[in-house]
Amino acid sequence: DLHGEKAVWIFPVPAKPDKTVIDIIKGFPRLLWGYDVKEKTDDAVSIAFSVMRMSQVYTFPFMLFSRYTSMGIGIEEGITIYEHIEKMGLTTELVTAEDGSAFYNYLTNKDLDLPSGLKSILEDYIGKEYSFVVSWISDVEKFKQESAIRDRYGRLINVVGVSISFPTDEIYFPLKPTSVYGSQKIPILIYVMDHVTPKLYLEIKNYVQVNYFIDKYYYVPKELSPFFNGKKEIENLNYTKIKIDAPSRYLTEDLWIKDSAPADVVLADFIKRSVWLWGIIFFILSSCLASMFAGVIAFRKDQPSKKKFALFGLWNFLTLIGFWIASLFLRTKKLKPELEQQLKSQGIVVWDNRKILFVFLFTVFFLVITFVFQIVLQSIF
């Protein structure tokens, strides 16, 4: 709730005023239902390897329980006002300033109580083709009445937004003005449509949390339709949540954001979308490696073929039971042709006790290898 009588928001814009469009809109995108890409991928990896380990049959019970304006419209001393909008008790102006003193005086003339260090911070933007979007609550009662909406719990809240459009090579959000508050922490929460990469400088790197979400079905509120290019609903809406909780004195630079997703997020999304493809690949790899290691150890006296035992691991597709049955027919003892023919004619089967060790080692190696692969994959995300 707003209890004071004055509030101001100053947003430096890295563009000339004739390239900047402003507006006041009711509401704000409510991005609440998206899933975190990395968390979802972590779950997918865990489930996939759990399913793999269920091939060992005896592990099954354990797995069940795991889980536009071009000319100025007003001039003050050293200030040019290019656009002036009043809506819902909020006033927004697009301005440029000749110097920091002129801009500071422009703000104080609106009876705003400004921090003493703001003037020097604002001067950093002067002369660099920056414009300023200044918004303040000019009518508190009107703001409370006309900006009121109900949240998902049915409570009345005041929500209003300022829309700013301007051309830029990279996504931009100003942080330097907040540094005026010194050691005080001013939490900043930034939502960016699509998966992007914030360029974090050293001072704030340890104070920033970046999460990547996908909302399967996002229904656009009517009042925000222009913001979403007239769309009423969006399937698989990608967005990035950037949370900054640093002491204000560390906000010495503005935040620039690359319009591309980090490699690990792209990989995570691919893994999540193609879980069965890579799951089968890792299942084959784990089965073949486990069978090869088990065969080399169990039949080491016979110098066994690594390739033969690696391929034998494919019987694991029939679970451990199928693998065990297949091992019964696996030839592991070399007999003379005459003796082999004689035993065969008499219906005698030669049993090799080493097969028991082979199957036991296989299932142990298989579990170990799948856990190792799972840990490695999950550590990436």
Image (cartoon, rainbow, N blue to C red):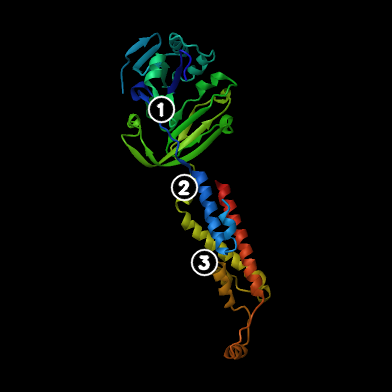
Dot 1 crowding, Cα within 10 Å, few <14, some 14–19, many 20+: few
Q: Position of residue 195 (x, y in %)?
A: 45, 39
Tag 1, which secondary structure?
strand
Amino acid type, residue under disc 3 in the picture: Phe
Q: Position of residue 155 (x, y in %)?
A: 44, 27
Name the residue at the right extreme: 301
Observer-nearest of 43 and 272: 43
Relative to 204, 239 lies left or right: left
Relative to 151, 247 lies left or right: right
User: Disc 1 vs disc 3: Cβ atoms closer than 8 Å?
Assistant: no
Dot 3 crowding, Cα within 10 Å, few <14, some 14–19, many 20+: some
Amino acid type, residue under disc 2 in the picture: Asp
Q: Nearer the viewer, mark 2 or mark 3?
A: 3
Q: Position of residue 83 (x, y in %)?
A: 34, 17
The answer to whether residue 260 is above or below residue 344 is above
Distance of label 2 from label 1 (alpha carbons): 34 Å
Residue 246 in sight: yes
Residue linked to disc 3? 317
Q: Quadrant of residue 169?
A: top left
Q: Quadrant of residue 130?
A: top left
Observer-nearest of 336 and 316: 316
Tag 2, which secondary structure?
helix
Q: Position of residue 134 (x, y in %)?
A: 41, 18
Residue linked to disc 2? 269
Amino acid type, residue under disc 1 in the picture: Arg
Distance of label 1 from label 3 (alpha carbons): 54 Å
The answer to whether residue 331 is above or below residue 64 is below
Observer-nearest of 290 and 14: 290
Q: Earlier in the sequence, mark 1 or mark 3?
A: 1
Residue linked to disc 1? 150
